[in-house]
Image: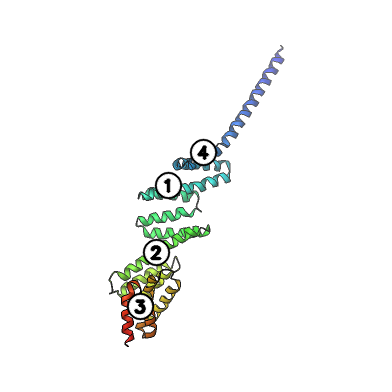
Amino acid sequence: MTVFSSMRTAITMTLCLTFMVVLSNKSATAQDSQAYKETFNEAREAALAKDFPTALTKYTDAAAAANVEGDDVVERQARKTIASLEYILGRRFLKTDDFDTALAHFDNGISNYPSYAKNYLARASTLKKMDRMDDAITGFAQTMDVATAGSDTKVARQAEDAIRGHYIFLASTALSRNGARTSTTDANEAMDYIITMLQYVDPDADAFYYTAVSQKVKGQSMEAVMSADEALALHTGSRTDKAKIYFVKGEALMNVGDVAGAKEAFRNAAFGNYKNSAEHFIETLGSN
């Protein structure tokens, strides 16, 4: 073999080896670029097996790798699932009163998938349990916005009920703290709570009822009658529960001298806890 033949053979072998290395590297790169899909599948299997911590870790890895590869579909699905897993895990810690850990899970869920309204609701509920009511109310309001945008009417309603329930409780407490001797100060405080509530949600029957009670205490009898009528129009509870609304209406009508209207209201109020008092007023008015 000549020198030139040896050189040509060596060069050919080198080129072949180089080509094989390039092919090998491309194959390895292709395999690496698809590894996140395998991780995603492993995450799904862990979730199905209810191994949620493992599933969360693998979905997190899959989301990060999918982002690098520009696979928006896999990344979005992974992050959406992360949000639901964080909700599940956060609820577990909430049940054991480990509020800080629960909040960390809900916050991470929100960070990964901001459209998942349940994490906002759970976060606000956790803040409420921690007696951080200002933050909780803000959280419930945010929940309403996110849930409404996502057409999640159930979560939106739960957040709305939480806000309304908080302020109704405060108004009720203000009006009942001194028993039958409710003062104008108590009534004003109750009205302040109702007004604050209206910044976030629409009034319900209870809101109009406590407004009527407050107005009656403050001597605003005709306004109290109108608020009571609004409460009656919205009320969906039992006849016994409805009696309290008729009773305050009867008191207000009695205060403005509408005897016939007051007696009619008291007749409708003569149920449950209001029965004896309503019948007493009917008897008293009947003798006038």
* Circle 3 residues within 10 Å: few <14, some 14–19, many ≥20: many
Residue where numbered disc 1 is placed: 89
- Residue under the point 38% across and 67% down: 168
Among numbered discs 1 and 3, the one appearing first in the sequence:
1
Q: Is residue 35 left or right of residue 231?
A: right
Q: Which mark is residue 216?
A: 3
Place residue 17 in its image quadrant.
top right
Q: What residue type is disc 4 on?
A: Glu
Instruction: In the rendered view, tell whether residue 285 sits above or below residue 30.
Output: below
Estimate the spatial distance between the alpha carbons at disc 1 and disc 4, rounded to whole Å: 19 Å
Q: What residue type is disc 3 on?
A: Lys
Estimate the spatial distance between the alpha carbons at disc 3 and disc 4, rounded to whole Å: 65 Å
Instruction: In the rendered view, tell whether residue 235 sits above or below residue 111.
Output: below
Residue where numbered disc 2 is placed: 165
| Visible residue check, residue 220 | no
Estimate the spatial distance between the alpha carbons at disc 1 and disc 2, rounded to whole Å: 27 Å
Among numbered discs 4 and 2, the one appearing first in the sequence:
4
Q: Quadrant of the N terminus?
A: top right
Q: Observer-nearest residue: 283 or 118?
A: 283
Q: Position of residue 113 (x, y in %)?
A: 50, 50
Residue where numbered disc 4 is placed: 42
